[in-house]
Image (tube, rainbow, N blue to C red):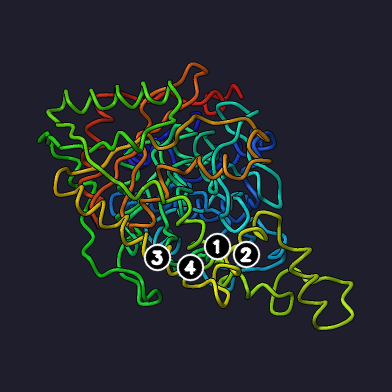
């Protein structure tokens, strides 16, 4: 039996019927990695023997598949998650050689419920990027077209699932780094509400914006992963005690629900024609489901890009100060003084885009500029939150295209930072407001590249997001696979 395109539901059903064993599944996915990933560059670390040993240990426990919600499921982990005994580079040379002494809470919860780590995957350095071209270990390529980007910063996570190298994967989303690559690779991508999932054991970028979420082929799979890893963690003071519903149980109901979707037409200006057509077609599907479309106003979203690029770099300049060449990771061999040790280790170990953001953040926090930049940005952030609060008095969800375009070519935007940053124009405000956002595929453009539809929910409204997206998914039907997932790449 060929493996690579199965969902969590498919694998769990097969285990329960004893059609195959975890070792057979994991062997199949490892075979795919060995045959396909040389073209993609999505995996940074794979441990076949260790992974197979864990799978064989589950072979004798097939009956546990009914009790462990992720029994024998191969999961790819973004390389900014700590996993005990594995290297964690966050896509940066400055962390080369760093081996994690403990495991991130989100990963630990998946493993406790039977998931098997298939490997650690590539990402933009310190999760800073929209194309996965900023990694110190080379760019990741899109399984739909190897000359194009998979999105970022979680490009390795999205490419791995889209190419059939993992059933699901974990990523982080600071300004769109799950939803945008999910859109560009034809997957479901979820950024939960801020605090819904523990950030303990994640290499920090911007602490008030970072959130953990899954990539999957279906909404049900995304719901299953979230219900396993969500919930309060006493190791993360920002994690919420808000109850975690059994999301997948909610999706079993045949009761159809209709929703009111809010659209800000001013926000949609500049979207590619194919993306705009697919977005409008998706709205028509929701109308067929009994939904209602209303116009809303989000006047401060036009400031989201500049607001984000003050807040996130400011927090990054603080978080990344710890990479000094002294405690762990990369250390220059040419320093003749303590000052040279710090400056050369950081200068040699940290990439251009990360340096750019550190300098921007340090400037925004400096004496005489704090009030004018960082403080003002946080005031605008609050205005963006208020815009969404007002919109949710009129609708259940705010909806947008996930990305203004489909996957662009490698190198196309690397010399124009503003053009690159605009790739996240529809996702950034969601992080600034701390809201949940979900991207589901809604069509293909004229080049046969995937297009994503984003639903933005109320705080801790993931349950409703899953229900609405699942209903849409049932009407849309099964989404096409990339040629690589079909074994033709």
- Spot occupied by residue 128 in the image (x, y as percentages of width and height): 57, 54
How many residues crowd around disc 2 within 10 Å: few (fewer than 14), some, or many (20 or more)? many
Q: Are marks 3 and 4 in contact (CB under 8 Å)?
A: no
Of the image marks 2 and 1, the number of the one nearer the N terminus: 1
| Residue 278 falls in image quadrant | top left
| 3D distance between C-alphas at marks 1 and 3 | 13 Å
Work out whether 82 lies above or below 472.
below
| 3D distance between C-alphas at marks 2 and 1 | 6 Å
Which disc, if any, is residue 16?
none
According to the picture, the residue beneath numbered tag 2 turns out to be: 358
> For this rendering, which residue is in front, 174 or 33?
174
Give the total number of marks visible in the rendering: 4
How many residues crowd around disc 4 within 10 Å: few (fewer than 14), some, or many (20 or more)? few
* Nearer the camera: disc 4 or disc 2: 4
Of the image marks 4 and 2, the number of the one nearer the N terminus: 2
The residue shown at (31%, 54%) is 435
Of the image marks 3 and 4, the number of the one nearer the N terminus: 4
According to the picture, the residue beneath numbered tag 3 turns out to be: 378
According to the picture, the residue beneath numbered tag 1 turns out to be: 313
Q: Is residue 348 left or right of residue 410?
A: right
Q: Is residue 127 left or right of residue 302?
A: right
Which disc, if any, is residue 372?
4
Task: Determine whether the residue tagged by mark 4 lies in a helix, strand or loop.
Answer: helix
């Amino acid at each position: 039996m060929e493996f690579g395109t199965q969902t969590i539901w498919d694998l769990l059903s097969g285990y329960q019927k004893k059609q195959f064993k975890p070792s057979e599944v994991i062997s199949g996915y490892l075979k795919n990695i060995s045959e396909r990933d040389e073209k993609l560059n999505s995996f940074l670390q794979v441990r076949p023997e260790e992974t197979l040993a864990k799978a064989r240990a589950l072979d004798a426990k097939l009956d546990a598949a009914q009790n462990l919600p992720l029994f024998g499921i191969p999961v790819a982990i973004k390389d900014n998650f700590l996993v005990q005994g594995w290297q964690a580079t966050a896509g940066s040379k400055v962390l080369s050689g760093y081996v994690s002494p403990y495991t991130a809470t989100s990963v630990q919860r998946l493993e406790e419920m039977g998931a098997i780590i298939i490997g650690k995957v590539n990402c933009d350095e310190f999760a800073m990027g929209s194309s996965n071209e900023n990694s110190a270990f080379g760019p990741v390529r899109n399984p739909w077209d190897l000359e194009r980007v998979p999105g970022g910063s979680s490009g390795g996570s999205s490419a791995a699932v889209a190419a059939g190298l993992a059933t699901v994967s974990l990523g982080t989303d600071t300004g769109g780094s799950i939803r945008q690559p999910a859109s560009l690779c034809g997957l479901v991508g979820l950024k939960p509400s801020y605090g819904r999932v523990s950030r303990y054991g994640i290499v920090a970028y911007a602490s008030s914006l970072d959130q953990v979420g899954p990539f999957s082929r279906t909404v049900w799979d995304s719901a299953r992963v979230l219900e396993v890893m969500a919930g309060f963690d006493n190791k993360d003071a920002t994690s919420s005690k808000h109850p975690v519903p059994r999301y997948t149980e909610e999706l079993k109901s045949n009761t159809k629900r209709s929703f009111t979707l809010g659209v800000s037409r001013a926000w949609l200006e500049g979207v590619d024609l194919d993306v705009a057509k697919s977005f409008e077609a998706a709205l028509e599907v929701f109308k067929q489901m009994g939904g209602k479309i209303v116009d809303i106003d989000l006047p401060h979203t036009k400031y989201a890009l500049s607001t984000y690029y003050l807040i996130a770099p400011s927090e990054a300049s603080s978080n990344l100060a710890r990479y000094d060449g002294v405690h762990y990771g990369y250390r220059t061999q040419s320093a003749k003084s303590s000052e040279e040790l710090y400056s050369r280790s950081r200068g040699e170990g940290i990439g251009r885009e990360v340096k750019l953001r550190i300098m921007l953040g340090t400037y925004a926090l400096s004496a005489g500029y704090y009030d004018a930049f960082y403080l003002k940005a946080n005031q605008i952030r609050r205005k963006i939150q208020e815009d969404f609060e007002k919109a949710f008095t009129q609708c259940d969800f705010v909806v947008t295209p996930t990305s203004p375009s489909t996957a662009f070519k490698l190198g196309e935007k690397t010399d124009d930072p503003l053009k690159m940053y605009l790739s996240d124009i529809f996702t950034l405000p969601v992080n600034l407001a701390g809201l949940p956002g979900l991207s589901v595929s809604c069509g293909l453009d004229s080049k046969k590249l995937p297009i994503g539809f984003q639903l933005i929910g109320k705080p801790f409204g993931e349950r409703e997001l899953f229900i609405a997206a699942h209903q849409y998914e049932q009407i849309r039907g099964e989404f096409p696979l990339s040629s690589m997932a079909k074994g033709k790449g």
